[in-house]
Amino acid sequence: MQKQLSDRINNMQESATLKMAALGRELRAKGHNVISLSLGEPDFDTPEYIKEAAKVALDKGYTKYTPVPGLPELRQAISDKFKRENNLDYGINQIVVSNGAKQAIANLSLSLLNPGDEAIIFAPYWVSYYEIIRLSGAKPVIVSADIDQDYKVTASQLAEAITDKTKIVLFSSPCNPTGSVYSRAELESIAAVVAQNDKIIIISDEIYEYINFGDHHDSIGAIESVKDRVVTINGFSKGYAMTGWRLGYMGAPEWIAKGCIKMQGQFTSGANAFGQKAAVEAIRGDQTPTQEMRAAFRKRRDLVIKLLREIPGFKVNVPTGAFYIFPDISYYFGKSDGETTIQNADDFATFLLNNVYVAVVSGSAFGADRCMRISYAASEEELREAISRIKEAVSKLK
């Protein structure tokens, strides 16, 4: 039998975060004490009131197929949430619930883009953006910001990247992998650029909205000049520690929502029924657990920054959201422990995993090959131990 996968799958890169997590599990299975700081997954359990709502839904028989765009009561709750918290006016027919925010972005890419189109992605970017865009046949156009810009792309950079082939602009705020958060003024500048071209759609990934250490969260879709051309992505995985529930959603212009419903209908149909019933309660219920998780993440952020700044050569900024630190570690490029020479961020991440059993993700996966991503969704004890190991490892690089 001839074993021949499609060119599409052969040309697709494996998710670097999932790959590093798998390598860590392999070493752990061999008896090594691996500390994983690679996955973007809260280490908290889903709040009890949400789990109880799922149990009640199961007992009431919510085990059947759901409408492709989601249960009406969940779509209404999301619409109300958008109005109440984000000043976004998405009606129920503009809401699409998916099997995670990742599927929502894939639906958009496949519904909006044709081969030859260009999609501008702000870098550093979440690992899957690039491959999702490529899957549609469109060309990813990367616009980068380094640590000196707090990893935030400027409006002037965006303006320079736009061509007559530009169809979408895609970014996250709070950002994965950097934790950077765009201010209202920065979003207004970006909106002013996009507003000059009526065929460009903005896709704003706001999945980390509730892990924001500033005074409030700003949504670019609330800006008048572009409000009819913004798709807002969100979900339940980060703010409610519901990663395994696989529930995300979008608010979009109705014509885009209809396209995504059509696409989702052929791939997965609607998300699970009892999970959606629980998600209604997540939005409408007591937000104290979410607020407590945010406070814990902020405390961990401050701890990790303090410890990393004690390591010679690490360049660290102060992210204001999500649960990541994205240090520039290029100081160590060209250095060696006598056996391994660090040429790039991939080498650095592999060196840490193999030598001190700490799993991080190379910045190359996020379009920033001078950096690495550390997830501080771990206990303070684990974070202290992991950074102590990192400090010990790099002390051997000369």
Image (tube, rainbow, N blue to C red):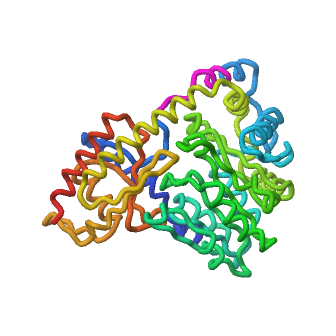
Q: Nearer the viewer, residue 342 or 330?
A: 330
Q: Is residue 313 above or below residue 208?
A: below
**Image coords of residue 295 (percent x, y):** 49, 33
Instruction: Say if the magenta span includes residue 77.
Output: no
Q: Nearer the viewer, residue 330 or 4?
A: 330
Q: Is residue 216 left or right of residue 252?
A: left
Outermost bottom residue:
164
**Image coords of residue 357 (percent x, y):** 27, 48
Q: Quadrant of the C terminus?
A: bottom left
Can residue 312 be seen here? The reply is yes
Magenta-colored segment: predominant secondary structure: helix
Q: Is residue 100 left or right of residue 381?
A: right
Can residue 1 be seen here? The reply is no
Q: Is residue 313 above or below residue 196?
A: above
**Residue drawn at (78%, 74%), measured in percent from left and top?**
197
What span is colored magenta in the figure? Answer: 44-53
Q: Is residue 337 left or right of residue 175?
A: left
Q: Is residue 188 above or below residue 66?
A: below
**Residue drawn at (66%, 60%), measured in percent from left and top?**
187
**Residue drawn at (69%, 51%), measured in percent from left and top?**
219
Q: Nearer the viewer, residue 318 or 397?
A: 318
**Image coords of residue 192 (percent x, y):** 73, 68
